[in-house]
Structures are given as C-alpha cells and as structure tokens.
Image: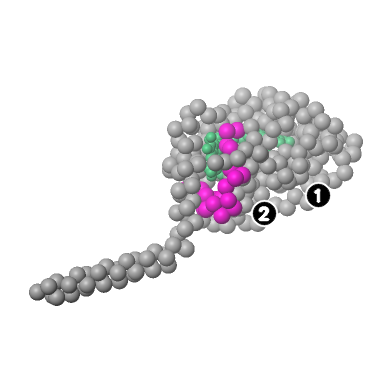
Amino acid sequence: MERRNRRIYLSVFALLFVFSFVAAVSVAFAEPANTGLERGKVLYERYCAFCHGKTGEGNGPAGHVLFPKPRDFTMGLFKVRTTSSGQPPTDSDIMNIIKYGMPGSSMPSFIELKEGDVMAVVKYVKKLADITKEPKGTIQTGTPPAVTPQLLALGKEVYEKKAQCWKCHGMEGRGDGPSAATLKDSWGQVAPPNPFKRNIYKGGGSPQDIYLRFTTGMDGSPMPAYEESLTDEERWAVIFYNYTLAGMDGVKVPFPSKRSENKPSVLLK
Ligand code: HEC
Ligand code: HEC
C-alpha cells in the first residue's frame, strides 16, 4: 500500500516537472518575437499614459490641464519628421522625440531611458498609431550655404512675398499675423504659429532642424510643407532671415547642429 502511494506521488512530481519544463521552454521561445512590444507597453503605461492615455487617444489624466494637448496618436499624424508630408515618421524620428522632447510644449525628454527601451516604446507608439508601412525615403538636409546679405535679402523676399509666412507668423515674427487667430489643428484645437522672437522650436533650433520643418511641414498642424514650392536656396535663405527676426544677426546660431548635443540634464529615476 505505502509503496503504491509513493509511486503515485513520484509520477505526479515527474509529470509536474515535465510540465514546468515544457512551459519554461515555450515561454523562452515565444518571448523574442514579443519582447519589444510587451516591454514597450509596460514602459508606455508607466511613462506616457499619464498624458497620452492608455489607448493613445491623448486623454490621460493630465491631458485636460495641458496646452497643446498630449498627442492623440490614433490619427497617425506626427509633426517632427524627416519624411515628406503625408508620410509616416521613421523609427528614429519618433526615437528623437522621446529622447529630446518637444521644447515649448509639455512633451518631456526621456534621455535616461536605455536605447533598447526607447526602441520598444517606439514600437508600441507605432502600434497605437497603426503605422504598418515604412515611409518612402527621407529628406537629406545637406550643408547650409554661407550667410551673405544677398541670402538674407532673398529670405526676406520669400518670407514677405513668395511664401507669405507673415500671414501666420507676423511681419516681425511675433506669431501675430492676420490668420494667426483663426488657425486650428487636425484635432480641432487652436494652433498658434511659432513666435520666432521666443527662439523655441519643437523639433530643434539648428538650421538643419528648421530646414526639415519647412520642407516636410508639421503634419496635423497648419504649418505647411514647402518641399514642392520653395527651392533649396530659398529654404535656407528664409531660415537665416528667421534668425534675424528672432533678434540674431543671422549668422551666430544659438543651437548646436545636432539635437543630441543639446541633451537636457534631467535624470529620470
Ligand atoms: C507631461 C505630459 C506628457 C508625457 C508624460 C509624455 N508626453 Fe508625449 N507629448 C505630450 C504633448 C503635450 C505632445 C504634443 C506636443 C505638440 O504637438 O506640440 C506630445 C507629443 C508626442 C509625440 C508626437 C511627436 C510629433 O512629431 O508630433 C510623440 C511621438 C510622443 N509625445 C511620445 C511620447 C512617449 C513615447 C512618451 C512616454 C515615454 C510621452 N510622449 C510622454 C505630452 C507628454
Ligand atoms: C497657414 C499658417 C502658416 C504659414 C503660412 C506658415 N506657418 Fe510656420 N507654423 C505655423 C504654425 C501653426 C506653427 C506651429 C506648429 C506647432 O507648433 O504645432 C508653425 C511653426 C513654424 C516653425 C517652428 C518649428 C518648430 O520646430 O517648432 C517655424 C520655424 C516656422 N513655422 C516657419 C515658417 C516659415 C518660414 C514660413 C514660410 C515659409 C511658415 N512658417 C509659414 C503656421 C504657418
């Protein structure tokens, strides 16, 4: 009798052992495909959902006190890109936003997150935004031309006549042009044009950064894309003219050429 019991116990143990082994092996093999997204979800819910909402609709508990509102990702619109208007952002566009934030808004910088974790969150944001396709190429900025009085005169011409930036941004770049008060974004909120006098740029303030904002436009906001309507020289010219409106001589640029050199010093715990 005792021996029979022992045998039953032993076989139950053996079965349990086999089951747990099989379970462990299947988890180990199932994980690689999923880790990015699973990890991204955990990090998103920890760091982002408070503003962007659990479902990515921009309706987290902090949303109602913020302006501009936390982004509703579900429309798939992104302002700061290296891709043409209407194209999805690249992974590194979203990565840079997470790393460096959007100055002048409440989108913070998460510079202390590990590279792999940032990538995982990027995956999760892309899932919320339903981005499944790769963008068609990226825009290369090249090197800015030398700043000459002729270039600045061309910039003024573009700003005031050809592209009529003043209608939104104001003749002196105070963000008070005649259309300014009527502008709305794709989410139906008022969308004030950037007052250059403030010298704060959501996508970075180097000439290369601003070149991209003109060229690609800021999808979801009224800021148009000038990839088709302005030449390369005209785009550089208007950037340096912008700096003169911001009170600089147009030559000394107060921003580093790469956003990564402008790392915020806050530590994330
Ligand atoms: C304190 C609130 C807050 C938190 C926390 C926050 N965001 Fe944001 N985020 C914003 C706001 C506000 C905007 C919209 C800014 C704008 O359009 O001017 C934004 C915009 C964005 C954008 C759009 C970028 C573009 O090019 O248009 C992305 C992507 C983004 N956030 C990702 C994240 C991720 C990922 C996290 C967590 C790691 C996060 N945010 C945490 C407030 C927040
Ligand atoms: C129809 C109105 C409109 C016109 C025309 C327009 N803009 Fe804008 N622009 C905006 C709005 C609105 C924003 C703010 C977008 C945001 O922060 O979400 C903006 C933002 C910007 C920014 C800030 C980018 C950043 O990273 O924050 C720059 C620089 C800029 N515009 C330059 C120009 C120049 C130069 C022209 C003309 C070639 C121009 N804009 C034409 C409406 C306009």
Magenta residue span: 105-128
Which secondary structure lies at badge 2? loop
- From where the camera sits, is residue 238 visible? no
x, y percent for residue 261: 72, 44
* Residue 127 painted magenta: yes
Screen quadrant of the C terminus:
top right
- Colour scheme of the rendered structure: one colour
* Residue 21 painted magenta: no
Screen quadrant of the N terminus:
bottom left
- Residue at 64% x, 50% y is 83
- Residue at 65% x, 30% y is 193
Residue for badge 2: 138
**Total numbered circles:** 2
- The first of marks 1 and 2 along the sequence is 2
x, y percent for residue 101: 61, 40
- From where the camera sits, is residue 194 visible? yes
Q: Nearer the viewer, mark 1 or mark 2?
A: 1
- Residue at 47% x, 43% y is 46
- Residue at 22% x, 72% y is 10
